Image (cartoon, grey):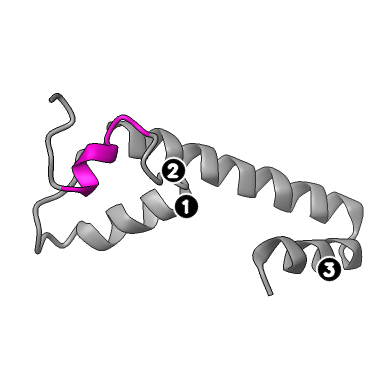
Amino acid sequence: MDWQSLLASVLPMLPATYAGDLVTVGTFLVALCALLARFWPRPADGSRWMKLYELVNSVAQNKGHAANADDASGKSAGG
């Protein structure tokens, strides 16, 4: 089951105020992670921050279109 089907089946069970709050918080988290992914350079391999970096990029749906997308392949973003 994908996340959209799960969300479509769970949201009708929640009261409207909770569903609205859930969607608002989820939207805020994705937007915040997208902003962080835009300005956070890739940590060095083996860094303790790498797991958090990967989580932020996955929540932000940073799949090659953000300014730091070249960091993921080990290239510099500037050129």
Where, by quadrant of the figure, is residue 36 drawn? top left
According to the image, label 2 marks what residue? 33
Secondary structure beneath label 1: helix
Neighbor class of circle 2 (other Cα within 10 Å; few <14, some 14-19, many 20+) is some
Q: Is residue 76 left or right of residue 25?
A: left
Circles 2 and 3 in contact, beta carbons < 8 Å: no
Q: Please name the amino acid that badge 3 sits on.
A: Ser
According to the image, label 3 marks what residue? 9
Q: Position of residue 38 (x, y in %)?
A: 34, 32
Circles 2 and 1 in contact, beta carbons < 8 Å: yes
Q: Please name the amino acid that badge 1 sits on.
A: Val
- Considering only vertical position in the picture, is 8 above or below 78? below
Secondary structure beneath label 2: helix
**Residue at image location 87% in from the left, 63% down from the top:** 14
Q: CA distance from mark 2 to mark 3?
A: 26 Å
Circles 1 and 3 in contact, beta carbons < 8 Å: no
Secondary structure beneath label 3: helix
Q: Position of residue 71 (x, y in %)?
A: 20, 42
The quarter in which the C terminus is drawn is top left
Q: Position of residue 33 (x, y in %)?
A: 44, 43
Q: Please name the amino acid that badge 2 sits on.
A: Cys
Q: Which residues are magenta?
A: 66-73
The disc, 1 or 3, on the residue closer to the chain's N-terminal end is 3
Q: CA distance from mark 2 to mark 1?
A: 6 Å
- Considering only vertical position in the picture, is 53 above or below 35? below
According to the image, label 1 marks what residue? 59
